[in-house]
Image: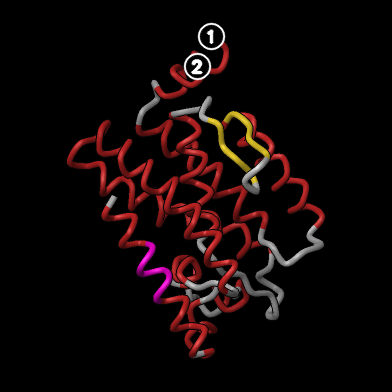
Amino acid sequence: MQVTYGLMVVIGLVSYLAWKRSELQSRLLLNPYETYYQKQYWRLLTSGFVHNGPLHLFLNLFTLYFFGAAIEQIFTIFFQEQGILLYLVLFFTAIIVANVPTMLKHKNNPRYNSLGASGGVSALVLAFILFDPLRQLCLYLFICLPGYILGAIFIAYSIIMGRRGRDNINHDAHLWGAVFGVIFVLLLRPSTVIAFLDQVFLK
């Protein structure tokens, strides 16, 4: 799990430095207008390393700690020496892919900004659910459901809230990160879907 811990340290350090230097945060966060029209495409990735505040950072790192470590271990088992590389590709690519719809949706709004590793973290959560759908996952520490049910609720919630757009949360990034996590695993190991269905329907 050393790679996961390394990711946590880097994300935490960059977020902290960005809080201290507002110009750094402005340079790294996702501003769809500047990303699209000024071709500052690095923002699609670097926005995953900055956060809005300590609580935002804590929630993403807390989730990364559990699900990132689990996926790192699972990938190492299934893909051996390529596992760590594939794990990093999943996480970083998920951040980028999750941000692309936001860039296209808000590219004409210079005042819109988005930041956080939620797209990558969502990909890890849904990837984990594919491998272990019956594992009890807890929301807010007291609502515990099998992973496949919680994953379905999460996706439905992200779609609904993304359409409403009434809060400051980038639900589109959550949704597309989650979808990418599922697609990534199925492309790497198609037999995962058979194991998933067997566990869910033949439990």
Foreground residue among 146 and 91: 146
User: In this rendering, would 8 be left or right of 167?
Assistant: left
Residue that mark 2 sits on? 199
Is residue 30 in view? no
- Residues at marks 2 and 1 touching, judged by CB atoms closer than 8 Å: yes
The secondary structure type at the circle numbered 1 is loop
Magenta-colored span: 8-13
- Verify whether residue 9 appears in magenta: yes
* Residue 138: image location, x then y, percent: 60, 40
* Residue 74: image location, x then y, percent: 33, 36
Decide whether the magenta segment is chiefly helix, strand or loop: helix
| Residue depicted at x 82% and y 55% | 164
Residue that mark 1 sits on? 202
Q: Amino acid at mark 2?
A: Gln
**Number of numbered discs:** 2
| Residue depicted at x 77% and y 46% | 160
Foreground residue among 107 and 74: 74
* Residue 24: image location, x then y, percent: 47, 86
Q: Amino acid at mark 1?
A: Leu
- Which picture quadrant has residue 151? top right
- Which picture quadrant has residue 201? top right
**Above-or-below relation of 80 to 124:** above
What is the residue that sits farthest to the top in this orientation?
202
